[in-house]
Amino acid sequence: MVKYFLGQSVLRDCWDQVFAAFWQRYPNPYSKHVLTEDIVHREVTSDQKLLSRRLPTKTNRMPRWAERLFPANVAHSVYILEDSIVDPQNQTMTTFTWNISHSRLMVVEERCVYRVNSDNSGWTEIRREAWVPSSLFGVSRAVQEFGLVRLKSNATTTMKGFEYILAKLQGEAPSKTLVETAKEAEEKAKETALAATEKAKDLASKAATKQQQQQQQFV
């Protein structure tokens, strides 16, 4: 049995901009799990298509029960192969990715197609398909469920990172990261709490003064 995932996203940037940003995705605030990225092959075909193969290394923590199956020094990182085909004439870019480490446990195969959005030529649509097979006897279903959840989470952070890089390349102020937003919210909460404390102290002081004045009237 193979778990299947299909997702579609839209970037509000033209295909040329997305194509340029694709090669500059890392680093970004959402890609701290990407440790290294190496180009192992690149060529231009006779029909002017760009073929590339990259080897990213990522941290990808396994479930604790799965960590027992692998040595401690490899349990927290994974090597991934990424093949891409860029067709500038038809404005399409297709990527294929799959993990080459931990394949005894699980293989996640992903195919993404970037093309001009059919409704708005200034936007780019992304069709993401993934297959999660596992042949691990007895726990294959649990492994596949874990892989699918992780895949969906990674797809979300990938899109956020893409949007961040696109804004940066266009000279715009990138949208705040979740950490920055949380920190701002925390600071604002502290300011609100401090203001409330000061106001409470002021009201208590006024109440105490009024009480003393009333007591003096009855003396």
Image (cartoon, helix red, strand yellow):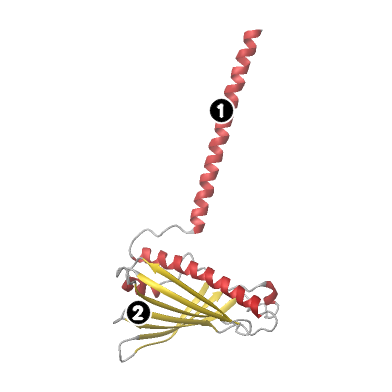
Residue name at image x 50 percent, y 76 percent: 36
Residue at mark 2: 92
Q: CA distance from mark 2 to mark 1?
A: 65 Å
Residue 12 percent across, percent down from the top left: 35, 65
Q: Is residue 161 visible?
A: yes
Give the SS element for disc 2.
strand
Q: Of 76 and 18, which appears nearest the observer?
A: 18
Q: Nearer the viewer, mark 2 or mark 1?
A: 2
Residue 18 percent across, percent down from the top left: 36, 72
Q: Of 24 and 8, which appears nearest the observer?
A: 8
Q: Is residue 33 visible?
A: no
Quarter of the figure with the C terminus: top right
First in residue order: circle 2 vs circle 1: 2
Residue 165 percent across, percent down from the top left: 40, 66
Residue 63 percent across, percent down from the top left: 65, 72
Residue at mark 1: 202
Q: Indicate the amino acid at tag 1.
A: Asp
Quarter of the figure with the N terminus: bottom right
Q: Of 31 and 144, which appears nearest the observer?
A: 144
In the shown orientation, is residue 17 left or right of residue 32?
Answer: left
Q: Picture quarter containing residue 171? A: bottom left
In the shown orientation, is residue 107 left or right of residue 10?
Answer: right
Q: Is residue 10 above or below residue 111?
A: above
Q: Picture quarter containing residue 61? A: bottom right
Residue name at image x 52 percent, y 75 percent: 5
